[in-house]
Image (cartoon, rainbow, N blue to C red):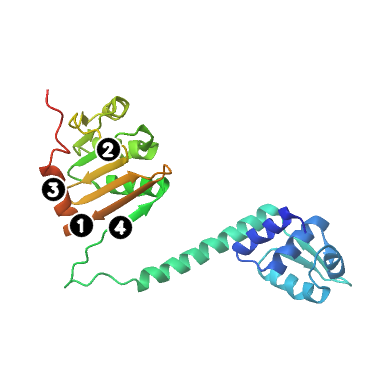
Amino acid sequence: MTDDESEAVDAFERLGLTSYEAKVFIALHRLGSGTARDVASVTDVPRSQVYSVAESLEDRGLLEVQQSSPIRYRPVSIDEAQETLERRFDRERERAFDYVDAVKREPANEETQEDIWTVRSRDRVDDRVVDLLSRAEEQIVFGTRLTEFITESTERALAERAEAGVPILVISRTDAVRERLGAIDGVETERPPSYRTDDQRSGRIIIVDDDSLLLSVVDDDGSETAIWSSGSLFASVLIQLIEASDELRPESD
């Protein structure tokens, strides 16, 4: 079996087929149609196993059986097989997540849990930033010195919130950042204090509704790590400390 075929078999297994089912299905597409002997001759599936595997594939709607002597098998078209597997995947996904949703434990009313989460990797931080921005109802403070942290999804989320009337303040010493985000209607921009030059590892700061906070740093290898919290005492206190400091105050004229 070639490396490409091995990868295809692995992919079919991830879609719910067994290794033998994947191999028989691929073999039948290679043959067009065939008997158990034909299939066994081009795969490592024993001939005695081909019959039960073909029966399973028929139950899955992936092949047709010709009642001849000997019995012949023909796979359904690629498009039909793809639709069949997609429907199966969707059903299993719904079944799995419906169950998880039904059994998840809600936080106890008598105790508040302080949730402080760590997120690693640029893509995951991007996703969390967009999620926090999208929830904003009262105000947003967004700060970064790096233009690469202004993704299309971040820019779109800021524009949508600005259009909804949410006040947005962008703080950055980088002209390109202020110019790009300042071009969005409803977004104000400011420079941080000029004497702050020790932030070469700083990533992003997002404050939403005085309730949610995300802070990130750039690691030595260029990746990003962030901590975030929402609706917690930690977030509330840290936001108050940041707002009381000079971090969010514009540079004096």
**Which structural element holds mark 1?**
loop
Which residue has dot 4 on it?
117
User: Which corner quadrant of the image does residue 161 belong to?
Assistant: top left
- Residue type at the position of mark 3: Leu
Earlier in the chain: of badge 2 and badge 1, it is 2
For the question of whether residue 15 can be seen, the reply is: no
Circle 1 Cα neighbour tier, 10 Å, few/some/many (<14 / 14–19 / ≥20) = some
Earlier in the chain: of badge 4 and badge 3, it is 4
Whole-Å distance between the Cαs marked 4 and 1? 12 Å
Q: Which mark is residue 106?
A: none
Earlier in the chain: of badge 3 and badge 2, it is 2
Residue 13's x, y, as percent?
63, 64
Whole-Å distance between the Cαs marked 4 and 3? 19 Å
Residue 95's x, y, as percent?
47, 68
Q: Are marks 4 and 1 in contact (CB under 8 Å)?
A: no
Which residue has dot 2 on it?
199
Whole-Å distance between the Cαs marked 3 and 2? 18 Å
Which residue has dot 3 on it?
241
